Amino acid sequence: MASPELWLLRHGATEWARNGRHTGRTDLPLLPEGEAEARALAPLLARQTFDAVLCSPLQRARRTCELAGLGAQAQLEPDLQEWDYGAYEGITTAEIRQTVPDWTVFSHGCPGGESLAQVQSRCKRLIQRSLALAGSGRVALFAHGHILRCLAGCWLGLGAGGGALLVLNTAGVSVLGLERQQRVVLRWNAAAASL
């Protein structure tokens, strides 16, 4: 492999993810189906060599990493924690839009939580750290839907707000890389079984 790859791996299903509730810093466990999704990643990841494995400290990401077979290699990375939703923690977009009709996390941020600019700063640090660890190899990043979407937006030069254009399912596999020195998406939101 001639250029670095960042493998973005979203955690498996949780109760709040299934119900559409914004799950930032609340430390929820995986559901049994989320554990099954995480185990399904193991055969794919076993065929890869990773120079580093970074993982959010929240248990849903840590458990996904463990069940996917990379727990022994993982380094906890606080910048991989999910967006801090502040007052919107644990509630759905539909509930928020009852008082802020056109709300999205990307356009409005979260009262008492993080702004888009703060998340973007974290993403830029994550990219720099990942590239330093990868050299010309691969880094696996186990984390959460919004932070990984924002990271991809920053990778593509769209800023964290570019994450609004991307959907990422639980246990979705995405790969960022280079083509002719241009940052690109090599794979997005793939299910392990399809790879």
Image (tube, grey):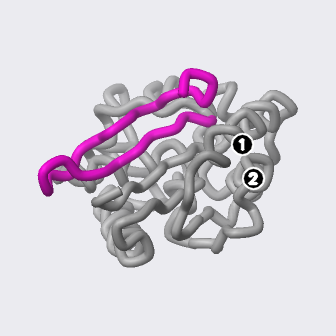
Q: Observer-nearest residue: 23 or 35?
A: 35
What is the CA distance from the residue labelled 1 to the residue labelled 2? 5 Å
Give the quarter of the figure containing the C terminus.
top right
Q: Disc number at residue 69? A: 2
Q: Residue at x 38, y 61 (%)?
A: 119
- Is residue 121 toward the left or the right of residue 35 in the image? left
For label 2, the crowd category at 10 Å Cα-Cα, with few meaning under 14, some 14 to 19 and many 20 or more, is some
For label 1, the crowd category at 10 Å Cα-Cα, with few meaning under 14, some 14 to 19 and many 20 or more, is some
SS assignment at label 1: helix
Give the quarter of the figure containing the N terminus.
bottom left
Q: Observer-nearest residue: 76 or 133?
A: 133
**Residue 15 at least partly seen:** no
Residues drawn in magenta: 171-195
Image quarter for residue 166? top left
| Above or below, 103 relative to 178 | above
Q: Residue 78's x, y, as percent?
A: 57, 72
